[in-house]
Image: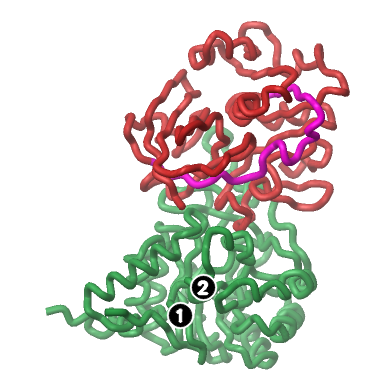
């Protein structure tokens, strides 16, 4: 029996629910020798800002129990560099491309939205409203009103589906999510790294040069899972569950909580072949449970579970 | 692509050790300067980069200093413990240096690992070797012949930089790996092999950034070897 792993959301058919989350995989090209992109549902590209950014000084990454804290700081070539150097090569990645942008002002969001809209290979635009690693900047998602403004600007500029990328560590993610959807977001990515730090006890100084960073990996899975669950309860829009998905069980949990698509970050950083392993695991699970389609398990935790008797 | 690596032999002297792993898969033509990403079966989650000290017939030897959770785990693991590795990653030194020259290998601490592999693979390119350590206890890890390359501060009061001064001339190249203060004090034309906190080891995650005169580069993808004069040291 073959199971159907495809997911239809945003009017787009994804061959399976596993997508590479924005960040750890960059623009994807370096991953090509290790991963056949035709095996994954989509890639969300590294976030692009208006101006080129060299990122934060090192150390930018440190391990932590159950995960890893990073403070890369949106290193990217800027929108001009992206349009000239990266966009023409996107065809090489044989999967759906989601573009990710982050503005530092409303004007910047506007320019970024316009430019992303023009790139044919980009099918969906993700608004990174929640990067924890930009020095001196508050995250957009900490303010519902600002979140709404940004999404409204983007909505006016493009007919492509828009995803608002939210952070799990805000006062009330459901309120922010509602605001984003009211303003025109087609879907939500939940979430991003959770603000975290480590201090070197020998020196008494923060390990990361930026002092704090974003925690990802297995440690944050139960946290983002709860945010996916709560958001799904309140809203009926497609959710990309991101946070500590390291194996098929984590992926299935996120789906059951209400995520239609499942984003991998830390897992790919540790093992570039993790996506394939996780997809095979999902397939085997569905076969074992005699469930013919992945769609059937999305959100079942809200609907009486799998009806196991 | 993750290869199982079974701990087969270990030799420890205080905070340094030589660890040999039996691999259940091939490392494809590993070269000196390249590294493997090694990971424990559970915690820590993250894989860490280790330079290849030696590799022969699916036996990989690493020279490791105990510094954090993963190295602590390797030190305390019993023989037979399973780890996972992938690689080799990073550029071979021979692809980045002038092949016509001979080199003085200047190592400090665990930085001697890639230099040892270099001297195994390219003995004709080695002019001299200076491997610096603080204490005499390090001798236990090496054969008598190998010990001739050691510069031990506790014994002679000299560092590798002191002994280098006596033999260095401009026709000879320098290939160095070790702590930043040591690298910073080498002649400008030296090739220095950098260490960095890495996430992926293949150039995607942008964790191991190093600022150079040609912009921000990555230790894993563009290095690990750089010209000393190219590096903006204030950023490190």
- How far apart are labels 1 and 2 at the CA level? 9 Å
Q: Is residue B113 visible?
A: yes
Chain coloured green in the rendered structure = A
Quarter of the figure with residue B133: top right
* Chain identity of mark 2: A
The image position of residue B67, as x and y in percent, is: 51, 32
Q: Is residue A216 above or below residue B235?
A: below
Determine which of the numbered discs, if any, sits on residue B6 in the image. Answer: none
Left or right: A114 with respect to B73? right
- Residue found at x 53% / y 75%: A42
Chain coloured red in the rendered structure = B
User: Among all residues in the image, which is located at the extreme left?
Assistant: A309
Left or right: A217 with respect to B36? left
Residue at numbered disc 1: A15
- Residue found at x 40% / y 78%: A259
- Residue found at x 51% / y 88%: A12
Judging depth in this view, the residue of A96 and A111 nearest the camera is A96
The image position of residue A177, as x and y in percent, is: 49, 82
Kindly indicate whether the residue at mark 2 contacts the one at mark 1 (C-beta within 8 angstroms): yes
The image position of residue A220, as x and y in percent, is: 42, 61
Left or right: B56 with respect to B91? left
Q: Is residue A231 above or below residue A72?
A: below
User: Among all residues in the image, which is located at the extreme top?
Assistant: B156
Judging depth in this view, the residue of B122 and A141 nearest the camera is B122
Determine which of the numbered discs, if any, sits on residue A38 in the image. Answer: 2
Secondary structure beneath disc 2?
helix
Q: Is residue B48 visible?
A: no
Q: Which residues are magenta?
A: B83-106
């Amino acid at each position: 029996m073959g199971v159907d792993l495809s997911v239809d959301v945003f009017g787009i058919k994804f061959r399976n629910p596993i997508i590479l989350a924005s960040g750890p995989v960059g623009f994807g090209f370096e991953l090509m020798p290790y991963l056949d992109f035709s095996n994954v549902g989509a890639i969300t590209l590294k976030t692009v800002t208006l101006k080129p950014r060299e990122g934060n000084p090192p150390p930018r990454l440190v391990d932590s129990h159950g995960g890893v804290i990073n403070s890369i700081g949106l290193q990217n070539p800027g929108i001009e560099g992206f349009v000239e150097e990266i966009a023409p090569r996107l065809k090489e990645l044989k999967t759906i491309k989601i573009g990710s942008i982050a503005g530092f002002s409303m004007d910047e969001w506007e320019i970024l939205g316009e430019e992303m809209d023009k790139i044919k290979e980009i099918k969906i635009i993700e608004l990174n409203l929640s990067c924890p690693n930009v020095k001196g900047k508050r995250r957009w998602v900490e303010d519902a009103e600002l979140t709404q403004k940004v999404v409204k600007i983007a909505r006016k500029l493009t007919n492509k589906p828009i995803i608002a990328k939210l952070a799990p560590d805000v006062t009330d993610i459901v309120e922010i999510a509602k605001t984003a959807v009211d303003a025109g977001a087609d879907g939500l990515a939940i979430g991003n790294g959770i603000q975290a730090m480590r201090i070197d006890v020998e020196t008494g100084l923060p390990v990361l040069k930026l002092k704090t960073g974003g925690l990802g990996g297995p440690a944050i899975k139960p946290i983002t899972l709860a945010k996916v669950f709560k958001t799904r309860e309140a809203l009926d829009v497609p959710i990309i569950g991101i946070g500590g998905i390291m194996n098929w069980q984590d992926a299935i949990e996120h789906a059951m909580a209400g995520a239609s698509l499942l984003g991998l970050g830390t897992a790919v950083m540790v093992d570039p072949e993790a996506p394939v392993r996780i997809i095979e695991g999902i397939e085997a699970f569905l076969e074992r449970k005699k469930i013919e389609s992945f769609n059937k398990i999305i959100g079942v935790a809200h609907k009486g579970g799998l009806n196991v008797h | 692509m993750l290869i199982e690596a079974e701990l087969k032999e270990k030799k420890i002297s205080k905070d340094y050790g030589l660890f040999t792993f039996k691999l259940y898969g091939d490392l494809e033509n590993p070269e000196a300067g390249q590294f493997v990403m090694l990971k424990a079966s559970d915690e820590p989650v993250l894989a860490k980069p280790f330079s290849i000290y030696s590799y022969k017939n699916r036996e990989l030897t690493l020279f490791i200093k105990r510094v954090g959770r993963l190295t602590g785990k390797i030190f305390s693991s019993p023989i037979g413990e399973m780890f996972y590795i992938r690689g080799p990653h990073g550029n071979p030194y021979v692809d980045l240096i002038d092949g016509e020259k001979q080199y003085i290998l200047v190592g400090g601490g665990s930085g001697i690992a890639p230099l040892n592999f270099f001297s195994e693979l390219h003995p004709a390119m080695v002019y001299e070797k200076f491997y610096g350590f603080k204490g005499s206890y390090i001798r236990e890890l090496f054969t008598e012949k190998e010990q001739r390359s050691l510069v031990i501060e506790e014994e002679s009061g000299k560092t590798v930089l002191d002994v280098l001064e006596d033999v260095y001339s401009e026709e000879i190249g320098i290939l160095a790996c070790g702590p930043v203060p040591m690298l910073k004090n080498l002649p400008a034309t030296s090739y220095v092999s950098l260490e960095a906190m890495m996430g992926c080891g293949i150039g995607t995650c942008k964790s191991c950034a190093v600022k150079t005169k040609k912009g921000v580069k990555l230790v894993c993808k563009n290095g690990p070897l750089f010209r000393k004069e190219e590096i903006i040291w204030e950023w490190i």
